[in-house]
Image (cartoon, rainbow, N blue to C red):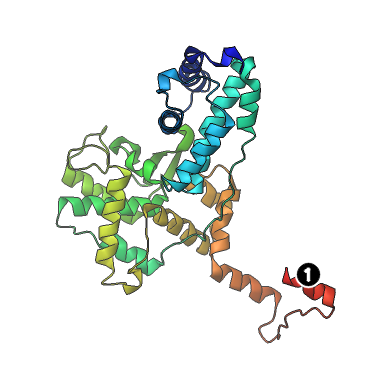
Amino acid sequence: MNPLLAVPADFASLIQRFFGERLIQQQNASPRTVASYRDSFRLLLTYAERERGKPPAKLTLGDFDATLVLDFLAYLETERHNTVRSRNARLAAVRAFAHYVALQFPPALQLAQQILAIPMKRFERPMLGFLTRDEIQAVLAAPDAGTWCGRRDRVMFALLYNTGARVSEMIGIRVADVTLAATSSVRLHGKGRKQRTVPLWKETATEIRHWLQYADLRADQSLVPNRSGLPMTRTNVADRLTLAVTAATNQCPQLAGRAISPHSLRHTTAMHLLQAGVDITVIALWLGHESPVTTHGYVEADLAMKERALATIAPPETKRKRYRPSDAVLKFLESL
């Protein structure tokens, strides 16, 4: 091994410079990106200590090789039971650091290239799940309007459905971000410091207006705080939605046993806009998608739209026949 790769101080210095200079100063990465990369390296260094028998302060660039990274990725999936998406997110952080090492420390170029050659793992994209209009209305009406938590939850779910916001965007809404006027709207702080303004339906604006009068919140406070006045967490929101879905099951029995997350409300917003005839590029802007290509997944999930498209190209009375190969070679190829 190159002796230059066996100095612990070099590895520690590169990690500090990668976060302090590269991410924060040069790239001006968002706090969420920095936090995600930080958590990835916490997991990686803890795993390396377990496998290599060295505390993080004693690790060297020679220890940071493709074998360690591949074993770490396998550990994430087998022991921590992370999804492929989570595995790829951790790998993205490691690859960003490897790219930085290749530029800043030429003796480690070969090690960095081997890590950069590790591919992202492919995965199946499940069909997007969403609620019908009756189901979403049952969920929106489920929280008890006679309690403080119930009123807050009604506002929270109405905002999620109205705006199609991600959970992180919804819990980041402050009172000052809401404009209640002739044309009401809310400003969302999205991924990568992107902001967008989404119009509010009259029902949502009325719900928020009543909530602000009831809760007496300051302009700098979270619009949907917890009991302590602090912003809610993702877990808080998911737990409250689970309670609402359980209560709504009495009105809509088909909700029983379904896994409905806050992101399901985002999918529901997109599907209902699509079914109402809203252009897909407008829906992409509404949801804060960087590219309309991401929004095309909702078209795939809407069976009714596919059936309407099919009806336009084939008369209902036409009898369709399935192709059957007559040649033995074609039969073999068809069976593959």
| Number of callouts | 1
In this view, 234 is above or below 17: below
Label 1, secondary structure: give it: helix
Q: Give, as a three-letter code, the residue at label 1.
A: Leu
Question: What residue lies at 60% left-to-right and 31% top-to-bottom?
Answer: 115
The residue depicted at 27 percent of the width and 42 percent of the height is 232
In this picture, is 72 found above or below 253? Answer: above
Between 114 and 23, the one nearer to me in the picture: 114
Q: Is residue 287 at all visible to an observer of this figure?
A: yes
Q: Residue at horizontal 51%, vertical 47%?
A: 84
Q: Judge left or right: residue 49 versus residue 237.
A: right
- Residue that protrudes farthest toward the left in the picture: 146
Query: Looking at the figure, which quarter contains the N terminus?
Result: top right
Quadrant position of residue 135? bottom left
Give percent across and percent down for residue 244: 26, 60
**Residue 206 appears at what percent x and percent y?**
28, 52
Q: Residue 217 at x, y = what percent?
A: 20, 38
Looking at the image, residue 307 sits to the left or right of residue 176; the answer is right
Is residue 108 rendered to the left or right of residue 56?
Answer: right
Vertically, is 111 above or below 120? above
* Percent position of residue 93, x then y: 51, 32
Q: Mark 1 points at which residue?
A: 333
Q: Quadrant location of the C terminus?
A: bottom right
226 or 197, nearer to the observer: 226
Residue 180 can be seen, yes or no: no
> Are there few (<14), some (14-19), or many (20+) residues within 10 Å of tag 1?
few
Residue 254 sits above or below residue 267 on the image: below
Could you tell me which residue is drawn at 84 percent across and 73 percent down?
329
